[in-house]
Amino acid sequence: MTEEVETEYGALLVDTSMFDGNGLRLEKGLLGKLAQFKKSPIVYLFPDVIKNEVKSHLESKIKISRAALEKALNDAGDHLFFEGSELNDAKQVLIDSKEIEGLAESRVENFIESTGALVLDSGEYVSVSDLLAEYFSNKPPFAETGKKKNEFPDAIVLMAVEAWADENDIDVLAVAQDGDWKNYCDSSDRIDYQEDLSKGLASFNRTNAPYALLANLEKSLNNNTASTFLSSIESGLESVFDGFTPDQEADSHLYWEPEGCHGWFKEFELVGTEFRIIDKDEDWVVLEALANITVEAEGEFSLSVYDSIDRDHVNMGGITATAIETFESEILITISGDLDGPIDDLTVDEIEVVSPIGTIDFGTIEPDYSEYD
């Protein structure tokens, strides 16, 4: 659909690729902000095909997480879960919990409830004959080359949504990172394409968004008169990264094992003064901003060298290393108070980091030879 004037969308469609790209975190981050549509006149579409794909991907994630948890618990067995330990019952609850088996299903159902999603029955809107006609004519999202059978789910979703939109006289914004979706939407009379979820959410706030707040905030930041606001963000980030435990990476001529790591927030800097409105109500708003966040971490490492004669690793002691890393991420800032008043009178209620750092590289590590002097 070609936009010559700004389109007022009546529905939102989010592809499975966006769920995967946001870590399948249905309850938080940008996906969590889809809950705003439950009380909105905007329809959030969750076709059965996407629902089943999300559920399947969640089940895979949960299996991987469960296996990692079980391995970690088994590795800790000698010190936490020995015979007679009071923690053994807790271990069995974690590993054998029936809740884990149905966790993907329950999370998807809770997501549908919290967002007020319309679970579209694709079979009511797409016939097999119409689907095959599109397939053999190579119409988007079917490509002329490649494994076209892989595009059947996309075709079913888009054709069903198109038919639903025609039936209800509603324009739809589709959010995906998929060239086939884009090709389909380019020729659609009802569906537009957007590949950025935050921009997609922002477009639904455009009509009634408190742009005075954004203009006031940008002016205050440019004039360096938003110190309290920035300090509140800093305090929120300190809480987010208080005691976080990233994975450890390092280089060494010796064999090394991670022995534990903890990190903390150091500083941050906003990248520009552009904010997006992600969610809003009468007296609060959720803004998205881009920031460079610096964290510091301390990691413990054990070092050893392989003895080819004994065919065993010889302990070379341990080392504690520190590292500082800066990463870029969107942050979600929940603000409440008089949105028309001074910036520094607003309350920052919550800070959420959309893409937190997961691994710290401690660089080159080696034994502290000064201990042997």
Image (cartoon, rainbow, N blue to C red):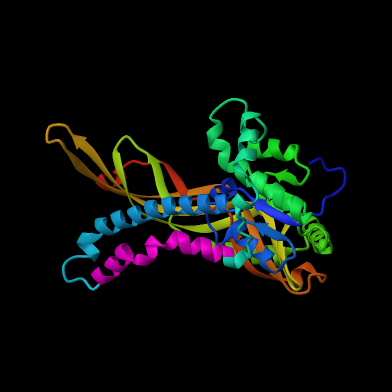
Left or right of 215 on screen, residue 329: left
Q: Quadrant of the N terminus?
A: top right
Q: Position of residue 306 (x, y in %)?
A: 21, 36
Q: Position of residue 295 (x, y in %)?
A: 53, 53
Q: Position of residue 149 (x, y in %)?
A: 53, 34
State whether residue 10 is above or below residue 349: above
Q: Quadrant of the C terminus?
A: top left
Left or right of 86 on screen, residue 133: right
111 falls in the magenta region: yes
Q: Residue at x 30, y 46 (%)?
A: 257
Q: Residue at x 38, y 66 (%)?
A: 99
**Which quadrant of the view contains residue 276?**
bottom right
Outermost residue on the left side: it is: 310
Tell me how many marks there are: 0
Q: Nearer the viewer, residue 295 or 167?
A: 167
149 falls in the magenta region: no
**Which quadrant of the view contains residue 223?**
bottom right
Q: Residue at x 49, y 54 (%)?
A: 55
Outermost residue on the front side: it is: 129
Q: Nearer the viewer, residue 181 or 165?
A: 165
Residue 101 visible here: yes
Q: Position of residue 131 (x, y in %)?
A: 62, 39
Stretch of the chain drawn in magenta: 87-112
Outermost residue on the right side: it is: 5
Left or right of 100 on screen, residue 296: right
Residue 231 visible here: no
Q: Specify the principal SS of the magenta part.
A: helix
